[in-house]
Amino acid sequence: MTPPAGEKITRGRTLNVPDQPVIPFIRGDGTGPDIWAASVRVFDAAVDKAYGGKKKIAWFEVFAGQGAKDKFDTWLPDDTVEAFREYLVGIKGPLTTPVGGGIRSLNVALRQLLDLYVCLRPVQYFKDVPSPVKRPEKVDMIIFRENTEDIYAGIEYAAGTPESNKILEFLAKEFPKEFEKVRFGTQEKAKKFWSAVGAKDFPTEVRVGIGIKPVSYSGSVRLIHSAISYAIRNNRKSVTLVHKGNIMKFTEGAFRDWGYEVAKNMFGAEEMDGGPWCRIPMGKPGAGIVIKDAIADITLQQVLMRPEDFDVIATLN
């Protein structure tokens, strides 16, 4: 893969973009090539219009997915990862990932290898565009979603494998009370169920898929710090920590608690009416921004009924 003539985007306090930046791209699989063929024309026309022909993107094709497998006999070449790492900005189409087996998600692999820890999703209403939402004109939010930790860490083991069985054995030995919460973690429990439903032929071995949900202090801090910093730079009015801490107290709940800690210790926010909600006070950058939290279930209802209450959202997976 040979890069075209052009210059690299560099990074200081901000991105330094030359007149002819080299930008790697992956066409993608399935509809990817068709989408790319239409999109690149729009990108080039937009740049030409915006800069009066003085700037132009030097597109650098790299490969991943089925295209890479066919061409290089690997799903994700090292050169592709290195190109994104070296040129800083890139774009990709949809990539093939078999569901339930085979290779792991290439999208997740790219996020992990490049440490793309924020999935930033702007959600905004465009006038005169049909919408099922009752008051779509009030929808204007930015979502910061964790991209590398939590379930996106990709630590999971298939049911019946030595790895999953080893974890079950560890739980049974070291944490017997927690092991009891694994509904069908023993042959006896499984047998009782199959007998109760009248099944004559059923698997006798234990089959439990295991996934691990890591949520770290450092990972949570950098995501929430990014969200609050964005809110300050862009004059937003609030940051909502969306979580399931009512159920997963030591992962989702910790994310919430660390979020308030970040707001108070790093941005000088002060508790409102005894907390936990807090506000950045006058005299500090971002004065008036409210940092609050909401349970995920309630959030999904409220973003439809009261979208004006949500501005910047920071959340896990």
Image (cartoon, helix red, strand yellow):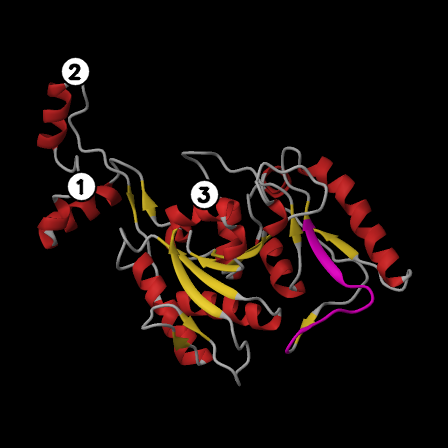
Between discs 1 and 3, the one toward the N terminus: 3
- The residue closer to the viewer here, 3 or 265, is 265
**Crowd rating for badge 3 (residues with CA inside 10 Å; few <14, some 14–19, many 20+):** some
Magenta stretch: residue 24 in it? yes
Q: Which residues are magenta?
A: 13-25
Residue assigned mark 3: 104
Which residue is identified by label 1?
182
Instruction: Report the Cα–Cα distance between label 2 and label 1.
Output: 21 Å
Where residue 227 sits in the image (x, y, percent)? 51, 66
Residue 16 lies within the magenta run? yes
Q: Amino acid type of disc 3?
A: Arg
Measuring from the top left, give residue 2's x and y in whole percent.
Answer: 73, 56
Residue nearest the observer in this picture, 218 or 269: 269
Q: Residue at x 58, y 36 (%)?
A: 132
User: Mark 1 Cα within 10 Å, few/some/many (few <14, many 20+)?
Assistant: some
Q: Nearer the N terminus, badge 2 or badge 1? A: 1
Reading the image, the residue beneath label 2 is 199
